[in-house]
Amino acid sequence: MTTGLNNAPTRRLPHSPGPLCQRINLTFGSFMCLPSNMHALETARLFSNRSAPFVALVGPSGWGKTHLLHASSDALRPEFLRFVGVSEAADYAVNPGRRDVHTPLLLDNVQGALDRSRPRLQLRLALERRVRSGRPTLLSFTGSVSSLALRTLLPSFKDWILCHIPVPKAAERELLAREMAKAEGLVLSDCLFWLLANQLAGNGCSLLGALKRLRLHQTQWRDPGMTLRACGVLNPFFADNSGWDLREHIASCAQEFPSECGGMRSEDLAIFAMLRIALLAEADVAQFFQIVPAAVYTRAIRFEERVSSPRNSDERADVLRFLRYTIAKLRG
């Protein structure tokens, strides 16, 4: 069932989505190359090939820095028997001497070691020793780090390759969403990919979390009815977007929709779409229309029974046209 016209949808119990960013298969082959991160990817490859000994990655959380660190670690591991891999900078700064100075050093979240003077000084001294001896070092800074802070921490600053990984643009996020959906076994409509790229706040982990939430329900989200239902399923993910209100959008589309069946009330159509297609909570729909939840449920059921009748094929066709109209309007 895709439109909810014939049978009531089965409500599912909530499931735990599990970790959003599972560290599995974090290799160069699984990294999504985009124009905004291409320089960082190429530099990380050079580091793993021992062609770029000192590299610092800087950028916001959730857009690939940790992935590149683990990919570099994976590429280097066969060469070093005592190679530890990726470490947290704050842990390393407490006791730099416990690490083998002859193996590559890969530190994540270096900004966490800059808050206090003693760890910052210890990290600086350890980096100075590594630069003097030419030991490969790859660092990752999350957030906005000033040029002065970088120059203060990184010895022989001119010897370092500095790579900024910015937040991807909407077109890049859509490409990323399509690759993630393919990996999750999801089939989404073009409208859903556009919404995930343009309306979803957060970072790559937020995007992955949204896709995993869809997969908990099912894998096919292509036709207009399922696209609108997906919007309802993902409604909590769009909550941070002040311009997003799925109820307002459905209600305004119902008022604008040029129905060919004059007996179909726009408010009943909107209530049906919110409750039986998008699966929004009865309390939320009732609050929007300022009526009691029981009345919302009754009106939605009666509308569904009416348009599901074999005698009302014209109205049923109208509802399907309305769903296509509502989805088309989501993209403006």
Image (cartoon, helix red, strand yellow):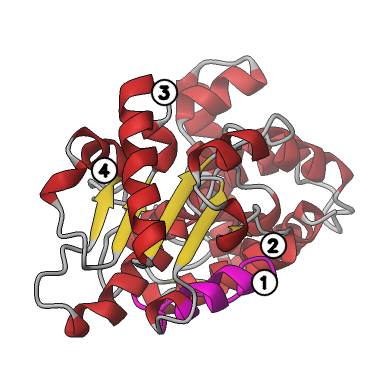
Q: Nearer the viewer, residue 90 or 291?
A: 90
Across and down, in percent, residue 193 comes to 63, 65
Residue ID for mark 2: 194
> Exactly how many numbered labels are in the figure?
4
Residue ID for mark 3: 115
Across and down, in percent, residue 61 comes to 49, 46
Q: Which residue is drawn at 36% across and 30% down?
A: 121
The quadrant of the image that shows the N terminus is bottom left
Question: Mark 2 falls on what kind of element?
Answer: helix
Q: Nearer the viewer, residue 202 or 79?
A: 79
Question: Mark 3 falls on what kind of element?
Answer: loop
Find out whether the residues at labels 1 and 2 contact each other: C-beta distance under 8 Å: yes
| Quadrant of residue 313 within the rendered picture | bottom right
* Visible residue check, residue 66: no
- Which segment did they paint magenta? 26-46
Mark 1 vs mark 2, CA separation in Å: 6 Å
Residue ID for mark 4: 14
Find out whether the residues at labels 1 and 3 contact each other: C-beta distance under 8 Å: no
Find out whether the residues at labels 3 and 4 contact each other: C-beta distance under 8 Å: no
Residue ID for mark 1: 190
Tell me: residue 146, above or below residue 73: above
* Visible residue check, residue 134: yes
- Residue type at numbered disc 2: Trp
Q: Which residue is drawn at 71% across and 53% down?
A: 198
Q: Position of 252 compared to 89: left or right?
A: right
In primary-sequence order, the first of circles 3 and 4 is: 4
